Image (tube, rainbow, N blue to C red):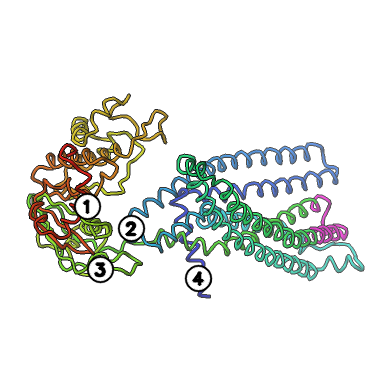
Amino acid sequence: MSKLREELRLQWKGIKLSKVISGKYYILCEIMSELLPQIAAYTSAYFSGRVITALSEKLPFAVPLRYALLAVSSVLVIWVIRRLFMRQTMIMRRSRYFRREAMLTGKALSLDFAQAESAEVAALLSRVEDNSDLFMGISSQAWQVSKIIANVLSVVIAVSMSSGMVMSKSEAELHGILKVVDSPVFGIMFALFVLVLIFLSIVANDAAVKRRFKAHESRGKVNALWKYYYDRVLNESGSGEDIRIYHEKPLIYEEMRERVFGAVRRIHSVFLHTDTTFGMVSTIVTAVLGGTVYLFVGLKALSGAFGAGKVVEYYAVLSQMILSFTTIAREIGLLRSNSIHLKEDISFFELESKMQNGTRTAADINTDKLEFEFHNVSFRYPETEPLVLHDFSFRIRSGERLAVVGRNGSGKSTMIKLLCRLYDPSEGYITLNGIDIREFEYSEYLKLFGIVFQDFNLLSFSIAENVACSTRYEADKVWNCLEMAGLGERVEKMPKNINQCVTKLYEEDGIDLSGGEAQKLAIARALYKDAPFVILDEPTAALDPKSESEIYARFDEMSGGRTAVYISHRMSSCRFCDRIAVFKDGTAVEEGTHEELLALGAEYSQLWNAQAQHYTDSSL
């Protein structure tokens, strides 16, 4: 019983979520779209019976004609109404995919960065996306529920219309089989026999559905492989050069033949075998049911319990009822097998942020004096063993220009991610003006930073919208930031200037920026935010040393007296900073000016000397 309650609770959650994704009246429209054709069939059966009864009783021609016209007009009205419901249903179905994708994206962005990046959540999101592709989970649940409800209502209508048939008795003196058939007991036995056959159909459908869903799960893995080959390997812009140069086409085709096409063949073989085996059972059951119903109705009519008109009506009604029972059986099986996928969808949408969110606002932050301090901070990335920062204590002084240098993996970018609360420390804590940063409201805290990360992302919108991160912007300020980032002259030459779209994804006349131009645009975006704390986290990797040095100098000029942190592999680009911190093995091993650190002859000196041969005064 507890399992049943849990299942019903799950289905109810799915229905509520489906109303959000598909539309408030989606399920109602689906129910009506499914039920109205059955009502039309019952209406047609009822009036057809009346027409035949009128003709057999030789009533005036106007009587059967009236019934015929009522049948035609009623069915026509029903189908017109159904078209209206179907139209609304199709609109909601077609928008459902985009709503669902928007909700998935919104949910992922609402999670903690650490949580969203975790392997567990990534795997769950992948399964949820597969559910959508394979029409499982929330994508199919509302449709299945709608069909079950509609066909249950259909059965109720059929039972009410045919109840008189089972209990009807002939007034004539009967003998033999006709006397048996005319007995109410026989009618009850007939009903029980029909229910047994329907139960067999339910069992067969349930077994078939389970096998199909198991095959569908395998198909999800194949879909993931196909996406990889299609997006990453067969994409001309991504792999075309390598495929040609290294003659990789035979290797790719061989892998796809076995891992994709071969797997798809095996899955469809399971589908075919399942449909053949269990479909035969369903066909036999349906045939026996139809024959039994036809025989019973015929014998009842032969006994004189009702006339020829009722034979037509009852047979049509019972046939439709059997079809509804078969549909209910199939959809219940689908619904039960779909529960595991529905649970995955709901589990993702029910994920909640785990990061502590404080209550202090911007009013509690003195932006004229921002002093950050790391207190014995240690950190390891989720689901990994090694520590990236070890007992790290460090202070970033208000208004200073700080350069952070070090080898790959020394913890430079990790420090920035902790500072911005993309992650929380595994041990220790970080303060802003002496207050634990976890006490600040998260969105308010993020307003402090203007950052350009290593792996920045540009949107396929206009230049101005990328800079301002909004459809509303100050054009003069956009131009100023582009000039400061060294991209103003390039944008002036574009046909639409700052209204030029980045990439050709949405606009045919879009501009594909080079790596260096994209980095300059990301820097202009950080400048436009005008935050009191600015950070460049190695965003200039695609630029030559001279261009990088020019960008740092311009950025330093515009940052004014604000606190600024510059992370770079090139020591020469950070010589203008007030202080340089050298990171190694997850901690700061040296601090000082360029001259002071060179005099130490330690880590910074080694890094400087290793790069010195690549630079000359003229290149800086």
Image position of 53 with respect to 294: above or below: above
Which range is magenta?
Answer: 289-311
User: Which of 171/201 is in front?
Assistant: 201
Is 289 rendered above or below residue 459? below
Between marks 3 and 4, how big is the CA–CA gap? 40 Å
Pick the front one: 480 or 355:
480
Name the residue rendered at 18%, 49% in the picture.
571
The residue indicated by pointer 4 is 5
- Residue position for label 1: 610
Q: Main secondary structure of the magenta part?
A: helix
In the picture, measured across the screen, residue 98 lies left or right of residue 67, that is left
Residue 73, position in %: x, y?
68, 38
* 296 inside magenta stretch: yes
- Asked whether the viewer can see residue 505, the reply is yes
> Which mark is nearer the camera, 1 or 2?
1
Residue lying furthest front in this view? 613
Front: mark 3 or 4: 3
